[in-house]
Image: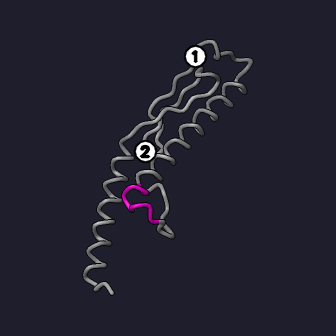
Amino acid sequence: MMNIQGIMKQAQMMQKKMEEAQEKAAQEEVCGTSGGGMVSVTLNGKFEMKKIMLDKSLINADETDILEDLIMAAYNDAKTKVESNLNNAISSATGGINIPGLKLPF
């Protein structure tokens, strides 16, 4: 049976690793695309949009609904990648242990 001090020390080490993993993930940027690359959205690990790129051929006042759909699709693609990066970082920091109640991001 482990002593309580050993358990507490391990918990503190895991918490430190998780914080480091979250900080690293927050600094990473990912790019999501749609429309065959005609729209791209770059997000950081906190889901903040850092950049958006639109192919000029998409800019047509009569077809804004298409552009809006492509922007949403690119954002969702980037969001999925950020979530995957965060899950991988946390899994790595916790040694694959699933921690109930852990909400991401941050």
- Which of disc 1 and disc 2 is earlier in sequence? 2
Residue at 46%, 41% (x, y): give it. 48
Where 1 sits versus 25, above or below? below
Residue 57 drawn at (x, y percent): 63, 12
Vertical relation: 36 (above or below) 80: above
What residue is pinned by disc 1?
55
Across and down, in percent, residue 66 comes to 71, 25
Can you give x and y, in whole percent of width and height, for residue 11 in the image? 32, 72
Query: Mark 2: few, some, or many residues within 10 Å (few <14, many ≥20)?
Result: many
**Bounds of the magenta span?**
90-97
Helix, strand or loop status at disc 1? loop
Residue at 48% across, 57% down: 104
**In the image, residue 21 lies at what x, y percent?**
35, 53
Q: Which mark is residue 5?
A: none
Q: Quadrant of the C terminus?
A: bottom left
> Furthest-front residue in view?
1
**Relative to 82, 7 lies left or right:** left
> Which residue is the site of mark 2?
45
